[in-house]
Amino acid sequence: MVVVAVDVGGTFTDFVVLRDDGSIESFKVLSTPRSPEVAVFEGLRRINAHVDEVLHATTIGTNALLGQVGLELPRVALFTTKGFRDVIEIGRQNRPRLYDLFFDKPRPLVPRELRFEVDERTLADGRVVKEVDPSEVEEYAVRAKSLGVVSVAVSYLHSYMNPSNEEVTGRVLTKYFNYVTLSSRVAPEPREYERTSTAVVNAVLMPIVSQYISRFSEGLRELGVGRFFIMSSSGGLVNSDEAVQRPVQLIESGPAAGAVAAAEYSRVIGVRNVIGFDMGGTTAKASSIVNHEPEVTTEYEVGGEVHHGRLVKGSGYPVRFPFIDLAEVSSGGGTIIWRDEAGALRVGPLSAGADPGPICYGRGGTEPTLTDANLVLGRIGDYLLGGEMKLNREGAIKGLGRLGDPVDVALNAIRLANIEMARAVRLVTVERGLNPGDFALMAFGGASPQHAAEIAEELGISTVIIPPEPGAFSALGLLMADERFEARISYPKDLEEGFTKLEEELSQRLSNVSYFLRYADVRYVGQGWELTVPVGRPARIEDVERTFNEKHQATYGFRLSKPIEVVTIRVFAVITRVKPRFGAKKLEGEAKPRYFRRVFFDGWVEVPVYWRGDIPMGQVIEGPAIIEEYGSTIVVPPRWRAEVGENSEVVMRR
């Protein structure tokens, strides 16, 4: 069976082909941001074999909520408990800018005239004191339909304890609308603002994702492809039905694939703790992998502002769903270098993207980028993608020259970008109670291996790992992922009984579950927010308390002598898939440089350039050196050495 993994990035769309003999190959095509599927179908036509299955990572959810690529948001209505129509507008008192009295809150995704108050009430203990009147719901549904509504969110008070009123409402609404979201199905958790926001975001995305998947499926059928799966934000693959019903879980689909790849590959090479560092054409992302598992968070703000890798609370739309914990900064190969009004050199946040791209791509770009800087310093060669793409060095020099001496500008821009990317790594380590020095830096993405060693020096990390196919490693992560389906309940009366019930529900929905993962959102009694901890079998409250105390100590530096409470429990049903095999080629002798070129480090140096596929396992390459391959270029600075490991990884050490 031939399986193809496709990761749609801001600049390139990456393809990794897994053939039935376990071999893999990769290639790239330029992305088509306005219609992402166009680049996907173009790449699939290049594969000289019948494709049985496609695995896909997409950013369409994020792009829609950020107002990108011309996606128009559908008209959405909200049905909520009487007296709570304005909860999504009031929100929390989080200010994105603390001292700005005139900041603009995010525009509500549902205008006030499309929020309908239903006279119903469920108490906090789950008792229904006023049932829904279906005729009232029907009256509002007719009015919403006449106002052009195409998708509806339902969020009633305390529905996480008893969803019966939401279920009745949902049955009425499905007679009028194709897209209906119940908060008790997408976010059965307390906090009515976050739960309502999650339901609304899901309702907004349902028509967009449904139409995208419909177009995608039709295109795949024309190409003879039978099945496809999509990466979720929690790091598992889901089928198209699950994606259409709960598209809120696709918001961080693309970035999650890279973290999954880093976690799974860390198992292959036997390194327990790694930092996944993914630098592509538009952004750089960092994730922490502890004991081969990526860190997971349960809340995210989509469409909000990012300040040096931190999501600015109160600037976006909260979503309560499991997300792989990532920090993202605007430092990619296409990030634009410029000077501000005071003449200071700046890098980002704007990106040249795929169209027009960096100056050196020769596609009409006029603004110098980090890719242009690496080319001018000799850290990448005149050709990319194994010679398929010739770069315009003279254009890059002229572009950087408008900002000053080209070499000085390039060198300082890269140093600024490295500091910014190191900050992203600190967000997922130091600010989570972890020491970066205890980790290896696993660098992937087309641009990451050029910067990884210098970023590691900035962080006090002594080991850098470049996995196979680094330029398409996020796509490779799709092939290394398993299928994952999530279910949760809040305030279980009995811990083990609650987990067992969730597992039985998932088993009835899925026929071939391999195993289950258990998690609990826990806090001290009286605390406002929770930490998510893994739960063993059988689920015992004393074990959960011990795990929570340890995580609280590591995260905040202290623990309290107070009882805990379990707010929400969740289960992932995992269906394992066949993974690609890794192993270094048994090459004889010693690789010789293919040629030499001038590269700037502390000064200009004549540096040997190797081809990665030529280097046998165990050969040590002393820096300074360059190692090229199809999808990326590895820079081995002075005082570093590189060696090929037994699973095709390149390990760099100081």
Image (spheres, grey):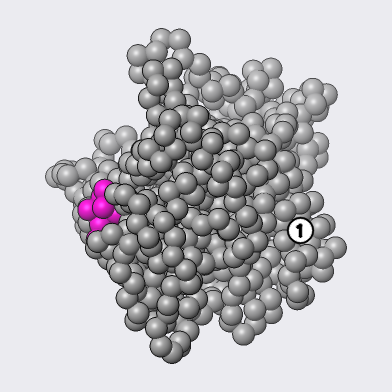
Instruction: Give x and y (percent) for residue 637.
Output: 32, 58
- The span shown in magenta is 455-463
Image quadrant of residue 622? bottom left
Instruction: Give x and y (percent) for residue 234.
Output: 49, 54
Callout 1: SS: helix
Amino acid bearing label 1: Glu
Image quadrant of residue 411? top left
**Disc 1: CA contacts within 10 A as few (<14), some (14-19) or many (>=20):** few
Judge whether 264 appears above or below 111 on screen: below
Q: Which of 601/19 is in front?
A: 601
Image quadrant of residue 44? bottom right
- Is residue 340 visible in this depiction of the protein? yes
**Residue at coordinates 69% horizontally, 28% vertically from top-left?**
77
Give left or right: position of 596 versus 303.
Answer: left
Give left or right: position of 450 versus 453.
Answer: right
Residue holding disc 1: 42
**Residue at coordinates 75% horizontally, 74% vertically from top-left?**
48
Judge whether 548 appears above or below 3 on screen: above
> So how many labels did they put on this image?
1
**Residue at coordinates 40% horizontally, 67% vertically from top-left?**
608
Q: Which of 549/40 is in front?
A: 40
Judge whether 568 appears above or below 529 on screen: below
Queried whether the magenta region covers residue 458, the answer comes back as yes
**Residue at coordinates 31% horizontally, 49% vertically from top-left?**
603
Queried whether the magenta region covers residue 526, the answer comes back as no
- Is residue 512 visible in this depiction of the protein? no
Quadrant in the picture for the C terminus = bottom left
Give left or right: position of 461 versus 473.
Answer: left
